[in-house]
Amino acid sequence: MWTQTLGEFIGTFILVLLGDGVVAGVSLNKSKANGAGWIAITLGWGLAVTMGVYAAAFLGPAHLNPAVTLAFAAIGQFPWAWVMPFVGAQMLGALLGAAVVWLHYYPHWEATNDPATTLGVFATGPAIRNYAANFISEFIGTAVLIFGLLAFTKGKWTDGLNPIGVGILITAIGLSLGGTTGYAINPARDLGPRLAHAILPIAHKGDSDWPYAWVPILGPLAGGVVGALIFTVLP
């Protein structure tokens, strides 16, 4: 279990380092990628997930997401006793990944005098704040994610191509469904960096928007379980 848990830590660290990194590059002032836009962000996140899975898959299942871990446990494909160690490793990896992004872009925080932009590098937020609608968006996106992951494992994919398929799936979700909330679809990806935002000495930062934080936690957890249960009723 501990070897696999280490894989979750490493993979989630890489996922957040590259994922939050592309958001920082696109969003922060004086970055050479500034203004590259939503397509760059979604492609960057898809590649970040692919690299995270490759970095972790030789050690374990490379969930890198509490919603994936919970969903697989709910349908009997993962032991319940391992859920909390996996989630803890994912959270720590996400927190550290976000901290390294802060360090990497250190001069750019001072150059970006916009608290909303700064928070957006670390955590997701709604385009229109409507908690019920935002929850539904995260629910649907994560249900699609888990359904797709289970389909990959049941299909004729090779182990070497699975991470690429996952990256394409993440990109597709981001392009098609991500515009409403920024598509966390992963509680660790949002909560770990949000904690980093709260504790790091970031120039010009505002609050960490904790009233919204439950949405990218509960929406993905619920959507992931439902997506997995739907998959199990298929022939």
Image (cartoon, grey):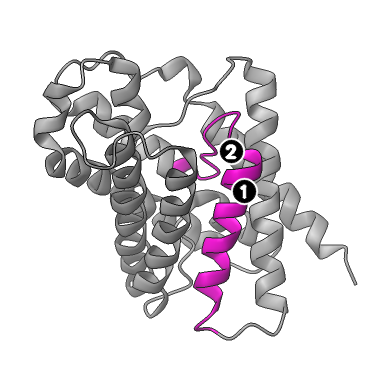
- Picture coordinates of residue 184, whole percent (x, y): 51, 39
Q: Check disc 1: other Cα within 10 Å, few if <14, some if 14-19, many if 20+.
A: many
Residue visible at 62% across and 36% down in the picture: 138
**Residue situated in front as seen by the camera: 184 or 41:** 41
**Residue situated in front as seen by the camera: 102 or 28:** 28
Residue 105 in which image quadrant: top left
- Picture coordinates of residue 230, whole percent (x, y): 82, 55
Q: Are marks 2 and 1 in contact (CB under 8 Å)?
A: yes
Residue 196 is tagged as none
Q: From the image, tell me which residue sits under label 1.
A: 173
Disc nearer the start of the sequence (2/1): 1
Amino acid type at image mark 2: Gly
Residue range corresponding to the magenta coloring: 159-188
**Residue situated in front as seen by the camera: 232 or 55:** 55
What separation in Å lies between label 2 and label 1 (alpha carbons)?
Answer: 6 Å
Amino acid type at image mark 1: Ile
Residue 178 is tagged as 2
Q: Check disc 2: other Cα within 10 Å, few if <14, some if 14-19, many if 20+.
A: many
Q: Is residue 95 left or right of residue 131?
A: left
Q: Magenta part mainly helix, strand or loop?
A: helix
